[in-house]
Image: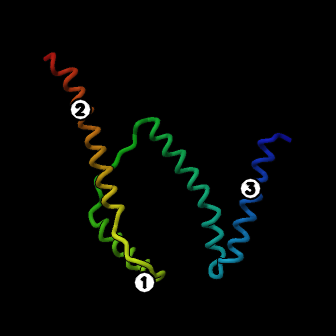
Amino acid sequence: MSSLLINITVGAVLFVGGISLTIKRYGTHDRLAFTVVAILSPIVAVFAVFRLLYLASRRQLKVDPCPPGLEDAERIVERERQRRFGGPLREPSLAKSWTTAYERELQKETDRVREVAQKYLVLA
């Protein structure tokens, strides 16, 4: 038996065993839902990583403007989190980081356009 096959088998057994014990211990309600989410989460995560690498290799990653109302939605989610679990109320950060990433992306595009314009339009 090859070493790769043994590694995959052991990893799968450990994963299934760990998920099973976690669901048995902590999944008091809706065990089927917990099981489906636990099984699909790693698959979705691996797919997302490969998709990100594919888009990055083709330079198709784009950051769109921050959707309107994202900061308000973050505040609503944070208040609900605090109501359910307690703890300090945190300020929304996703909308700010999204806006910063969008501005950086715009700056990169502007720099590329400026370089092309200087390279080709100076001769005109």
At horizontal 16% and vertical 22% (from top left) the residue drawn is 121
At horizontal 33% and vertical 50% (from top left) the residue drawn is 101
Amino acid bearing label 3: Ala
Which residue position is annotated with label 1? 83
Compute the Cα span from label 3 to label 1. 37 Å
Q: Is residue 8 left or right of residue 71?
A: right
- Report x, y in % for residue 56: 45, 39
Q: Is residue 58 left or right of residue 46?
A: left
**21 over 120 or under it: above or below:** below
At horizontal 61% and vertical 55% (from top left) the residue drawn is 43
Tell me the quarter of the image containing the C terminus: top left
Residue 50 or 3: which is nearer the viewer? 3
Pick out the residue farthest to the right. 1
Give the number of the mark in front: 1 or 2: 1
Image quadrant in which you'd find residue 17: bottom right
- Report x, y in % for residue 103: 27, 48
The circle drawn on residue 12 is: 3
- Report x, y in % for residue 1: 86, 41
Residue 30 or 11: which is nearer the viewer? 11
- Sequence-wise, the earlier of marks 2 and 3 is 3
For the residue labelled by badge 2, is the local secondary structure a helix, a strand or a loop? helix
Which residue position is annotated with label 2? 113
At horizontal 63% and vertical 82% (from top left) the residue drawn is 29
Image quadrant in which you'd find residue 66: bottom left
Asked if disc 2 and disc 3 are in contact, CB closer than 8 Å, the reply is no
- Sequence-wise, the earlier of marks 3 and 1 is 3
- Report x, y in % for residue 89: 37, 76
Q: For the residue carrying disc 1, how many other residues have a C-alpha within 10 Å: few (<14), some (14-19), or many (20+)?
A: few
